[in-house]
Every structure is written in structure tokens, then in C-alpha cells.
Amino acid sequence: MGLRFYNTLTNRKEDFRPIEDGKLGMYVCGITAYDMCHIGHARSAVVFDVIFKYFKYRGYNVTYVKNFTDVDDKIIAKANSEGTDITSITERYIKEHNEDMDRMGVARPTIAPKATENIQGMIRLINALLERGLAYVVDGDVYYSVDKFKGYGKLSGRNLDDMMAGARIDIDEKKKNPLDFILWKSAKEGEPWWDSPWGRGRPGWHIECSVMSQRFLGETFDIHGGGRDLIFPHHENEIAQSEGATGQTFANYWIHNGFIRVNQEKMSKSLGNIFNMREAMNMYHPEVLRLFMLQSHYRSPVDFSDESLTDARMGMERFYETLKKMKDALSAAVDSSDMSAKDLSGKDKEVFERVQALPERFVEAMDDDFNTARAIGYIFDTVRLVNGYMADKEFAPTAESLFVLDEAKKNMRRVGKVLGLFLEDPDEYFEQDKKREAQKMGLDTDEIDRLIEERREARTAKNWNRADEIRDILAAKKVVLKDSAGGTTWKIG
RNA sequence: GGCGGCAUAGCCAAGUGGCUAAGGCAGCGGUCUGCAAAACCGUUAUUCACCGGUUCGAAUCCGGUUGCCGCCUCCA
């Protein structure tokens, strides 16, 4: 069984067949650079980041292109309101975007082109559409004539008649058909412009993706992705433009990620419930956010709420507890470097074999429509297995057992790398988590440390009443203490 | 109005024709611990919104009902 995933074009899961063996071209629609990224952008970025990394994990040579839209009405409006030009707006938000995505553990795409760097290509493509009779010029504007493209609607599963029946289409005098969309927009006073055969103007939104994908990936490429909302009209229009101009299939597979909702509602500016990525990452570790997203299937909607994020945080804690235990055990002065699987027997052998199965199970899950939720379930299985192994009274840090643990750790890290999880040192993770949570709750960490010290003295004197009293005081603030041989540590429960 | 999606335990969530319906969070009982925390063991859906149908067999396929949601306008 090979890799298969859901193709929006056919509405079913299909076996993946790349155009060229071992190679793959993927284009994903990126952001319009006029504002900070929100968690919806983060989900899309994380979904395609995992897909990108998984294809590489499976041995594909992937060219991943994700664009920046750096000219559009919203950018112009923002530039005008700030009394500046569009470039200073887009440069700023592209920089912020990159900063946020880096912090989120999202790998940079192979190529990240900008619309404004491809204006000549757009003009050429529009010309080709005009020559083929698929577009028309009205007063310096160029429109795409949807009636002329017979495949119009094939991606979103609609036809022109159905859409005409919808009552929400604006009538525009210039358009021959209300569904026609703009390819080239003539410039009004004070707007940025480029010279074109139709006068000064700027490109419509959809044309850039047709041009940039074709430029870097060819006329026909493997995968095109983006958020669900882009299916119509954006992706439908891209198909019309690209296939209309080349006569070739545009993208073979279409992947669309589901939306993030906030407390059961759609995220929207009017509801004022937009969470930007930066706020979210200040409130939760980026890996907690990734776990939250990846524990649901990429096509399902997910609900962003304190409860769901707290669940994810607890799950992440479980992973890092185990990673910490393994790390601590592996720091024992026992050398396991000469060991091999042949030296194992009994329990060691059994655990080793089950631990070794993780990458295979991971592939089984991921090959089935990138089922990260199932894959994460398998990692939790491994966590329980390893915890049980270490909790066994018979367990001791021998060359054999450490060899097994090392294998477990490597396998968790290996699959975690694809998901963007477990990349942190466990001690560092808990340290960060403690600070972040304490800050969220407005707790004074010095005060906590002082009480812990007082409790240590009480415990040394076997004054259990006072020790428990301090535990209760802190517990009331959700500070949970953990006593161990090395001293007392705390975390927010 | 048109098109499409979803409904699985207290919550989140995998599973799309057939072994005991993954996994996480929360809860409960036990082991461990001065007490805890973490961890481990056990336990928590005879049942997959509801009603019919197909089938030897369905959470999974078909029809209907109800509820929720998305797109049709910028949108990840």
C-alpha cells in the first residue's frame, strides 16, 4: 500500500502517482501581506508543513512553492491609511509572517515568490487568454469569460446555472457574465501600477498563482493546496486561467485544509474573535498548538478554545514526561553503544520490537490521507509501553535497557520531526511551560520558590503538617509540587 | 435560494462492510509515595443523532427525518 489522500477534484481518496517518480511539485496559496497572521493561517501552514515533511520522509524530492500576495486592494488600503507605500506594508508583514512561522516550527518552502516579481508573466498569461478568446478588455480592465471555459466549476462541484441561481452576485455593468472575474485592473489615481498592453494597472488576485505555479513547477504539476475557502472562487479561477491558457491539466491533486473556529464560531473580524499567531504562541507552546491541530484530521474543522488547548497541553506534558524519563535514564554511566538487537532477550527484546514498530505504524497512518491523529495515537501507545517498561520493578539501567530506550527515543524523535513535535529538550520544555503558565495566572515565582524552601525545611524536620499546609496553599493557586530525590519541582496543573 | 460537509463515551477524537469501536483529556478504584505529583494496572460507548432499507453481517452502503456547520462576497 502506498500513499493515498483525498483529492478535492474527485471528492475521494486516491492513490498518489507523481508525474515523475520520486519527485513532486506542490503549490500552496500563501498569505496576503497586510496584517499579522492568525491561527487559521497557522493551521494551513502547519498542515502543509507536515505534508511537505512527510513527502520528504517518504523519500520524495519535493519542490514546495508558497507565494506571498504583495499587491491587492487591502494592502493598498492599509498603505493609504498609514500614508506609506505598499512595499513598506508588505515587507513588514512578510517579515512578521516569517518570524511567526519559524517560531511555529514551520519549515520555509523551497521557493516563496512574490506576486510583484511576476507581473510580466501575468501579462503574458493574460495575453494568451485574450488570444484564445477566453478574456475580453473593457476600459483598461481585462475580464475572464467563464462561459468560454467548459471545465468551469469542476473543482467546487457547481455549474454556471446553479451559480446564476444564487441571489448574491453583484451585477457589474462591465462584465458580460456576472461570474466573470478580473484578470487585470486599471489603476485609479494614487494606486500602484505597472504598464501593460491595456494601460496602467495591476493584476487581479487569481492570476498570480497561475503564473507562479507554472513558472516554478511547470504547466502541469502534482499538488495544489490551500484553505477550504479558496476552493471557490480562487482555485476554480486558477484552473480556468491555467488550463484555458495551456490546454493542459493544471494540478493533478488538490488538498484543502479545514477551518479553525473559536468557541464554536467562525473566526472573523466582525465577531472580533481573531486570534493572531503571536498571541496564541505566547499563551501556549508552539508544539501544544501543533498537537492541538494535528490531533484532528486536517480536513475537519477544529474548535480553538481554552479547554481544547488545555487538553493539548496536558497531552504534550505526557510526551515530555516520558522523554524526560528516558533522557534521565540515558544519562546513567552505562555504555550501550556496543549493543545490537541480537543481544536482547526477554522483556528487553519484546519492548524493543514494539518500539521499532512505531515508524511503520506511523507510515501506515500517514499514508492514509495524512492521518496525523491516528499517528499521534500510535506515539501515545509507545509512550505507555516505554513508561510501563521503566516503571517495572525489574527495570535497571543496563546496557540492554538503555539500548532499548535509546531506540525508543530515536523513533519518537524521528516521527516527531515530521509532525514538528518533541523538538525541545524536556527540561527546557517544562521550564518554559512553567514560566508561561505562571505569567498567565499572574503568579509570583519568587514567592513560590520561597514557600518551597520553607516546606523543605519543614519536611527535613518531619513537620508534615506545615509541609502539607504549604502544598495546599500552592495547590489553591494550581501550583502542583513534585518531590523527588533531587529536590522539589513545581508546575502549573 | 443554489452547492457541499458533519453528527462516535462527560469532553476532544480515530475508525468508512466482518477480530475485543484507536488514542488523548477528565473521572473512579488500586500500586508507588510521609502526604502528593508523575508513572503503571484496572475501570468508564452491548454501541456509533433518529427512522427505515440493502446484506449472512453496517458506526461504516442506500433512502428519509432532525440538528449543526461551511461555501456561493475578501478570506487559510
Image (cartoon, grey):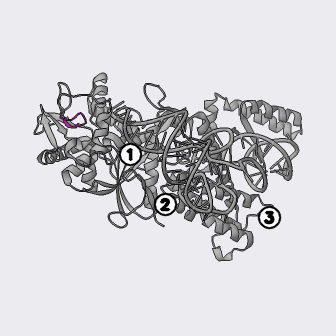
Secondary structure of the residue carrying tag 3 is: loop
Helix, strand or loop at label 2? It is helix
Q: Are marks 3 and 2 in contact (CB under 8 Å)?
A: no
| Badge 3: chain ID | A
Q: Is residue A84 above or below residue A59?
A: above
Residue at 63% over, 70% down: A337
Q: Nearer the viewer, residue A122 or A276?
A: A122
Q: Secondary structure at mark 1?
A: strand
- Do the residues at discs 1 and 2 belong to one chain? yes
Q: Which residue is mark 1?
A: A226
Compared across the picture, whether A272 is left or right of A348 comes to left
Q: CA distance from mark 1 to mark 3?
A: 51 Å
* Residue carrying label 2: A367
In depth, the one of A455 and A204 nearer the eye is A204
Q: Chain of mark 2?
A: A
Labels 1 and 3: the sequence-earlier one: 1
Vertical relation: A477 (above or below) A388: above
Q: Which residue is depicted at the point 22% across and 47% down?
A: A149
Mark 3, residue position: A394
**Magenta run includes residue A405:** no
Q: CA distance from mark 3 to mark 2?
A: 38 Å
Residue at the far bottom: name it: A342
Q: What span is in magenta?
A: A176-184
**Residue A351 horizontal side relative to residue A95, left or right:** right
Q: Position of residue A56 (x, y in %)?
A: 43, 60
Q: Is residue A181 magenta?
A: yes
- Mark 3 and mark 2 lie on one chain; the one further toward the N terminus is 2
**Foreground tag (3 vs 2):** 2
Percent x, y of residue A28: 36, 48
The amino acid beneath tag 1 is Gly
